[in-house]
Amino acid sequence: MAHLDITILGQHYKMGCPDGEEENLEKSVIQFNDKLKSMKEQAPARRNEQHIVMAALNYCHQLNVEKIKNERYTRELNERIRLLQDSIEQALRPTSENIE
């Protein structure tokens, strides 16, 4: 387990992450800080905690939308595979069965 020192909106945190995932975590922190900075520019009167909650909810929503898309795509691919398997099985049946 690796440990990184990160900063979000000026607050310092020590976070653990799986070995080898340090770069991904650092990129996520940069992305999150950029999102928070943009939100603060649009609504400077809000407290940091409000921006963090809103950003977290936005990311959760985006993740759920992508999960739904992925599930739909997986179902479509499974149906295509099933149709291909049926076609292959039909083509491989002995010719006498194909004539009947």
Image (cartoon, grey):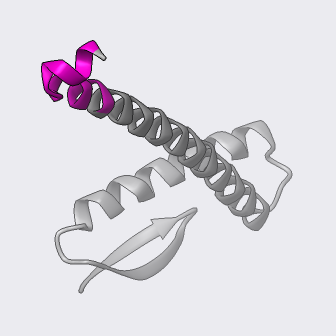
Q: Pick out the residue farthest to the bottom.
A: 1
Q: Is residue 7 left or right of residue 38?
A: left
Report the side of 39 relative to 80 (left or right): right
Tell me: residue 80, above or below residue 50.
above
Q: Is residue 92 above or below residue 17?
A: above
Q: What residue range appears in magenta?
A: 86-99
Q: Nearer the viewer, residue 82 or 13?
A: 82
Q: In which quarter of the image is the N terminus?
A: bottom left
Residue drawn 68% across and 49% down?
A: 61
Residue 3, position in %: x, y? Answer: 28, 83
Q: Residue furthest right?
A: 45
- Residue 23 in the image: above or below residue 96: below
Image coords of residue 71 (percent x, y): 52, 45
* SS assignment for the magenta stretch, majority: helix
Query: Which residue shows up at 73% across the image and 56% down it?
Result: 51
The residue most toward the top is 99
Is 90 placed left or right of 33 in the picture? left
Quarter of the figure with the C terminus: top left
Q: Where is residue 59 in the image (x, y as percent from the top left)?
A: 61, 51
Confirm whether the magenta stretch covers residue 90: yes
Q: Which residue is drawn at 13% across and 26% down?
A: 94
Residue at screen point 65% across, 59% down:
56
Q: How many labels does the image show?
A: 0
